[in-house]
Image (tube, rainbow, N blue to C red):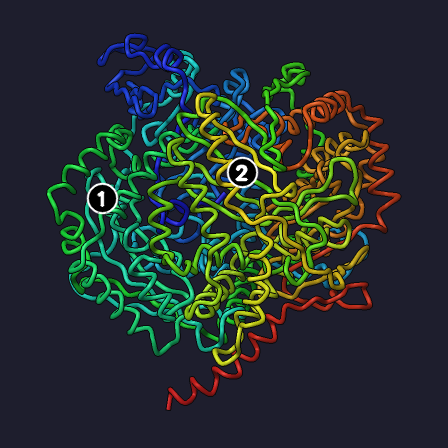
Amino acid sequence: MLRFTRWQLRSPRNLTSFRTTGLSRRSYASITDASNFPKVGEQLHGFTLKRVKQVPELELTALQLQHDKTGAEYLHLARDDSNNVFSIGFKTNPPDDTGVPHILEHTTLCGSEKYPVRDPFFKMLPRSLSNFMNAFTSSDHTTYPFATTNAQDFRNLMSVYLDATLHPLLKENDFTQEGWRIGPENPLVIQGEGSEDAKRLVFKGVVYNEMKGQMSDASYLFYIRFQDHLFPDINNSGGDPQKITDLTWEQLKRFHSDHYHPSNSKILTYGNMPLIEHLKEIDARLRRFDKITVDHEVKLPIPLEEPKYVTVQGPLDPLVPPDRQHKTSVTWLMGDTSDIVENFSLGILSNLLLDGYGSPLYQSLIESGLGADFSPNTGYDSAGRKGVFSVGLNAVKGGDVLKVRETIAQTLLEARKKGFDKVKVDGILHQLELSLKHKTAHFGMGIMQRLKPGWFNGVDPMDALAWKDTVRAFEARYAKGDYLQGLLEKYLLNDKAFTFTMEPSETYTQALVDEENERLAKKIHETTESFCSEQEAQVYLEKREQELMEVQEKARNQDLSCLPTVHVKDIPREKERKPLRQSNIGDVKVQWREVPTNGLTYFRAVLGIKELPDELREMIPLFTSAIMRLGTRSRTMEQLEELIKLKTGGISVGYHSSPSPLSLSTFEEGLSFGGFALDRNIPDMYELLRTVIVETDFDGPEAEKKIRELLQSSASGAINSIAESGHSFARTFAEAGLTPVGRLNEQTAGLSQVKLTTSLASRLPTESLADVIQKLRAIQALAITNSSKLRVALNCGVESSTPNQEALRQFLESLPNEVTTPSTAEAAEYPRNAKSFFPLPYQVYYSARALATVPYVDAAGPPLEILAQLLTHKYLHHEIREKGGAYGGGAYSRSLGGMFGMYSYRDPNPQNTMKIMNEAGQWARDHTWTPRDLEEAKLSVFQGYDAPQSVSQEGMRLFLSGITDDMLQTRRERLLDVTAEDVRNVADQFLVQRAPQSSVAVLGEKKGWANAQNGWEIRDLHMTEKIEEMTQQQMPEEAAAAN
């Protein structure tokens, strides 16, 4: 999985922090007591303990060790948390743009010395009870983490991960499958029909297609090109498709030999398992190696001794106005991130400058209309050794690029003169206090992801863990006065900045296609030179593709007995029930989950709205954004934001829909509300929630301007959202015509919502939004009431139940009484049993096939859930990813809502994928399922059912969906008891007999096969036409500029 550290963890407008689980002092002490561990300097199982640090605020003890023979660094975080984490990572500075770290990440997981099966990583997914398994390629390091609550599972996975990374087989056919190769576009058709189109040679490979899809994301493209110029010594670790095809198998193996060595590794374990057990296993794997000299170099950005300007070209964005196609940013270099206190302080400074609608840079850049949203590199990036601060905008007019830079400089200067209100700083520190108290089920994985980037770049992880020490040191410096303003002046009030701009090119996309064709022709010619004729070369490439397919096919039935596994017998037949209490305050039902929460109260509410008109439902996403933007008649949004940060951990309003567990035709919809705060601040939280819902001023003089700003910001990011999650959009649309809730989801979160938003955003400034505002006011009038339509859930400590009840009673009394929902107009209809194609400007495809099944309580549901896992791991992954070259593909069975579906992600061959999906039901019906197959499928299902749960989520299944403990227990037992015959029966009943009732949706570049004659209905979002229009508009402009 590609993960650019600076891309994922830059936190431009949010300060990264730890979230804890708040355990009892007795258990905390027993696990983390320093007296239970070796002394500093002691040697044990091949390691020497270097340092020990207790961190009470995180309820953990950190132990830093070093492997004596290899020098491997090891950090163990002892904490009374059963969700144990393991991670091994390597410094992998990429030598070029071929993506060798990324392709190596994939191929290491394709078989190893101890586990010489094809693709043990994916084979382990259904042999484990892990709640997290993955691998990440970041810009300068690669990490392999997992998390599980089962001790045997932990040992199994650690064995597989260590062998995969240190002793991979790295077979040539794994390289060609995962990296790149040249082969016939559709070898399966060649076998059956001899189609000339199918014989057409193309570039193939999982990573190659993944990166083609990644490059279709304009935000990613801007970010990676920015990185190319700011960090020229850090090449593209993910791989540029134009360079990936230069990588050879020999280079891949050499890169592994040089980098995947214990001397270059950093290992982290976390949780309540004994350190000694870990040391024994890890030392047994590392001692086979000798210490070597490795490349630990930390790559730095270019020096900025004077202003630097770079402009590159990028694609047109059809969802942004034609005259707003530029993206631009300004970047300064900051201090050394190993200075923990200053690094923390710069994060706060960034937050003050950028976070929220009242922040100075938001107001001067976005509210002023210079751009629609911040650029993807905006914020303080502390992932490297040198901190980097960037401010940029999307959707900028070409003539305003220079003005953006000037405005940023002027805003920073004014911020220096004005200073920062103490209340804003207090709000940020209050958020950090809450983050330490807030319970989360995945603390270990979060701390690993937070520590690893800095650790690889010279930041001491022990210092990074000392959270309270850092905050105290900051507070001491801040108390002296002028501290943050001094940092601003030190780093930002100068012109030693890097201005990076991406300008639109109407030929960009076609140039990519032409370049790929030229590169392909060149590679084919190089291959042809080894043969007597082009025909012989073609035969050779076809034969090689067939041989790879044969290897892939053999792997389907290979002996997996060497792989470790846990067993279904390890899964308890009965799940522990969390006691809930029900009460009423007037007509409002209240659900209580009373449990230790570290002094926090979690609030959720749902207001049911029956027969909501489509014209209002589709506006709810805009309404929930607007009430957090406009302010009231008496308070600006900036003032409200300050109070929200000072008094709460956040408040939220959103759209709610949930099918009944008893029937597919019955559902609930309405609005949901949430928030959490310290117990003492709950009345303030309620008042803030009431204020933003009831008092938001939609008639203010700035209301229309700000709503237009929200629409343009949303439209600006829409095409990148689809590129990132196209399979989800395809699934949502495919499901829209099958069930009532499917229709609601498409209207509020699908392509229909994207189309509506971009249509409203494209209105000219002279075109009024009065009709939109009228609908938003209508939603506000019915948004929340003190009536039987409202129900509430509170998770809090038993000691705070009484004051919480009184605070809730007062909150309810402050709300309006019963209101009337407007009459329902004619409802929109979506295609049922249809094939829908959406032309979009992407280099790869996203597809989905969906079929309505049965409600939650139906006995056919559990076998369908098992069938989805079997199809994913035994058929679809093999056919769509390994053979077809898509980045991902699988099946899903949504138990609540009764939906079964299949999908593909970043797929180069959707026609073949559709054929595979069509044949899936018959394949599953006729397949001989073994006890081992069922065992693995059940383990996969229970990874989700038994995943650790945050205390804030306890009771939410019943509250939000109506699924009782008895319903869940019945389903659990049925899942454990599913037989092979059950699976074959549901495969036949639903996927074969009901196949004509399914719906299909595909997103991507329109080609000849997607036409009415083949049954496809083209549902255009008009992106292609917009690109053509913009191209026609731009050509004369460029010609005039040239003259």
Question: Where is residue 564 shown, x and y percent of the image?
Answer: 59, 19
Write the residue at 19% across / 59% down.
304
Question: Where is residue 530 shown, x and y percent of the image?
Answer: 57, 56
Can residue 893 be seen in this snapshot?
yes
Toward which corner of the image does residue 152 lie, by quadrant?
Answer: top right
What amino acid is found at the position of numbered circle 1 in the picture?
Ser
Question: Where is residue 610 shown, x and y percent of the image?
Answer: 70, 50
Residue farthest along the top direction in this orientation: 35
Vertical relation: 96 (above or below) 255: below
Q: Tell me the SS state at disc 1.
A: helix
Which quadrant, please, contains the C terminus?
Answer: bottom left
Find disc 2 in the rendering and name its residue: 604
Vertical relation: 884 (above or below) 861: below
Write the residue at 65% across / 66% down.
839
Q: Is residue 706 left or right of residue 571?
A: left
Q: Earlier in the sequence, mark 2 or mark 1?
A: 1
What amino acid is found at the position of numbered circle 2 in the picture?
Arg
Q: Residues within 10 Å of mark 2 (few under 14, many from 20)?
A: many
Find disc 1 in the rendering and name its residue: 345
Q: Is residue 836 left or right of residue 125?
A: right
Q: Tell me the SS state at disc 2.
A: strand
Q: Residues within 10 Å of mark 1 (few under 14, many from 20)?
A: many
Q: Between residues 529 and 897, which one lies in front from this camera angle?
A: 897
